[in-house]
């Protein structure tokens, strides 16, 4: 882009409108003739108030303003012109018979760009007018080009930020996928071994219990030493509790297998292609991973997760990346609830429990899926809501948030899936994030 400026080409008289203000008709006529003879467009007024109105309506390129006028004088007129944001940048040149330094300084201090003393020479008048019109047009051109350059730099900065977010997102998902794949592989082998052996152990224990029952049936009165040992180990309790113990172990192993499955579902390596999937599976896997943060603690009861799932079709999407969006929104909801608990007792929280509502619906036109994640935490101010998706913006303490989570979440929803991500919130009334995904 070429930013070289040709001063001679910045203006032509035919393109310039000049407002001449003087209470003397003869002066107006003289100046009008001088300016129109060289091609300027000219409008005239004979008092300050009318001049201000004309300036607002016509937006002249320059104003020639007499100092001594009835009503409001030239100084007051100039002052009012400069106080109006719509016309304050129009250059004002004073015309006066008073040539004392004090008056000139006063005029320049209130915003005039020049001072012409009456009677003036035609050449001097035209030279000063042309100079200030050139300066005005130069300033306008520079402002325009600075604005264009700023807009271009802003676009470049936005592109760089989006590229950086994409790199962070890609690296994050790649690293997470590799980590989870390795962890799942290492977990699955011993868990599979334990799960398989528990079945055999259950059968073996049942055989032993049957044998003990058979023995007690045929030998109800064993020697005293055996009777003492039966009492010492509380054989009756062991025989009753052992099946429960095996059942609990099976449940524990199944829980580990579910977590492993959830991890693999959550971090599916699909960054290069979309796949058909059930959105609810992604949400459920995210909840499973965050379950440790939802459990009751010494200071609060469980965080209640209320699921209101609609009947949704499968969606072609990058499910691993959408799971990251769910993770970010749910983790933020938990953070907001934890913050809302500060200063509240266990009983107070129990009375008004922490809740996260997850609602999925199919839009009426059946072209979109809506996912709402709502908490009853601290909420956000209007100012925070405007910045919440900005690059590197965070309300968390140093070291607790990067300011990338919601930026990446919006990029995934908007750019990767052509959807929208919006927030509704108010201080003290919780927050609701609404994801809209096209089918």
Image (cartoon, rainbow, N blue to C red):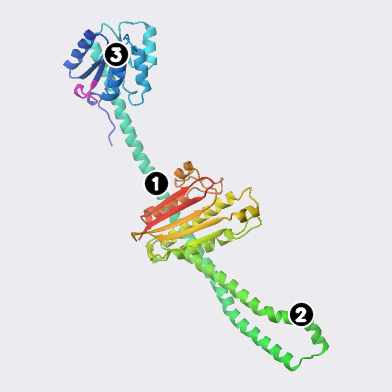
Q: Position of residue 213 (x, y in %)?
A: 70, 89
Q: Residue at label 3?
A: 47
What residue is shown at x 16% (from left), y 15% (from top)? 37
Q: Quadrant of residue 107?
A: top left
Q: Which residues are magenta?
A: 10-17
Badge 1, how many Cα within 10 Å: few under 14, some, many 20+?
few
What residue is shown at x 33% (from left), y 6% (from top)? 99
Question: Counting residues from the N terminus, which is met first, the one under dot 1 or under dot 3?
Answer: 3
Task: Look at the image and tell me whether residue 156 can be seen.
Answer: yes
Badge 2, how many Cα within 10 Å: few under 14, some, many 20+?
few
User: Is 326 or 68 nearer to us in this picture?
Assistant: 68
What residue is shown at x 40% (from left), y 64% (from top)? 312
Q: Residue at label 2?
A: 233
User: Is 134 or 261 nearer to us in this picture?
Assistant: 261
Whether residue 135 sits left or right of residue 435 in the image: it is: left
Q: Is residue 137 above or below residue 242?
A: above
Q: Quadrant of residue 241?
A: bottom right
User: In front of the other: label 1 or label 3?
Assistant: 3
């Amino acid at each position: 882009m070429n930013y070289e400026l040709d001063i001679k080409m910045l203006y032509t008289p035919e393109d310039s409108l000049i407002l001449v203000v003087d209470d003397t008709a003869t002066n107006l006529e003289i100046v009008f003739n001088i300016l129109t003879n060289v091609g300027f467009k000219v409008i005239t007024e004979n008092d300050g108030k009318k001049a201000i109105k004309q300036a607002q309506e016509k937006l002249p390129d320059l104003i020639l303003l007499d100092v001594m006028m009835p009503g409001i004088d030239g100084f007051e007129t100039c002052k009012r012109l400069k106080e109006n944001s719509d016309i304050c940048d129009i250059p004002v040149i004073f015309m006066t018979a008073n040539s004392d330094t004090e008056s000139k300084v006063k005029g320049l201090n209130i915003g005039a760009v020049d001072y012409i003393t009456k009677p003036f020479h035609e050449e001097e008048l035209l030279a000063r007018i042309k100079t200030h019109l050139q300066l005005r047009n130069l300033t306008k051109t520079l402002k325009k080009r600075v604005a264009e350059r700023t807009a271009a730099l802003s676009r470049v900065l936005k592109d760089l930020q989006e590229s950086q977010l994409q790199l962070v997102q890609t690296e994050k998902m790649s690293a997470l996928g590799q980590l989870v794949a390795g962890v799942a592989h290492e977990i699955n082998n011993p868990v599979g071994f334990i799960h398989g052996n528990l079945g055999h152990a259950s059968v073996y224990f049942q055989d032993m219990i049957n044998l003990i029952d058979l023995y007690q049936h045929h030998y109800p009165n064993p020697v005293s030493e055996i009777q003492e040992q039966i009492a010492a180990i509380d054989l009756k309790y062991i025989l009753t509790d052992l099946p429960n113990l095996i059942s609990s172990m099976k449940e524990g192993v199944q829980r580990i297998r579910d977590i492993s499955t959830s991890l693999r579902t959550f971090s599916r390596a699909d960054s290069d292609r979309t796949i058909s999937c059930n959105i609810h599976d992604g949400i459920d896997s995210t909840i499973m991973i965050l379950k440790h943060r939802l459990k009751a603690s010494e200071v609060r009861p469980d965080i209640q997760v209320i699921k209101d799932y609609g009947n949704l079709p499968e969606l072609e999407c990058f499910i691993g990346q959408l799971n990251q969006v769910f993770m970010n929104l749910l983790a933020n909801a938990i953070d907001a609830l934890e913050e809302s608990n500060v200063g509240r007792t266990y009983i107070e929280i129990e009375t008004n429990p922490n809740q996260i509502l997850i609602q999925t619906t199919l839009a009426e036109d059946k072209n979109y899926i809506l996912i709402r994640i709502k908490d009853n935490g601290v909420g956000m101010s209007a100012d925070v809501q405007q910045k919440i998706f900005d690059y590197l913006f965070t309300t968390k303490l140093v070291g607790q948030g990067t300011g990338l989570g919601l930026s990446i979440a919006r990029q995934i929803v908007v750019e990767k899936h052509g959807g929208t991500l919006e927030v509704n919130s108010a201080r003290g009334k919780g927050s609701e994030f609404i994801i809209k995904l096209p089918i």
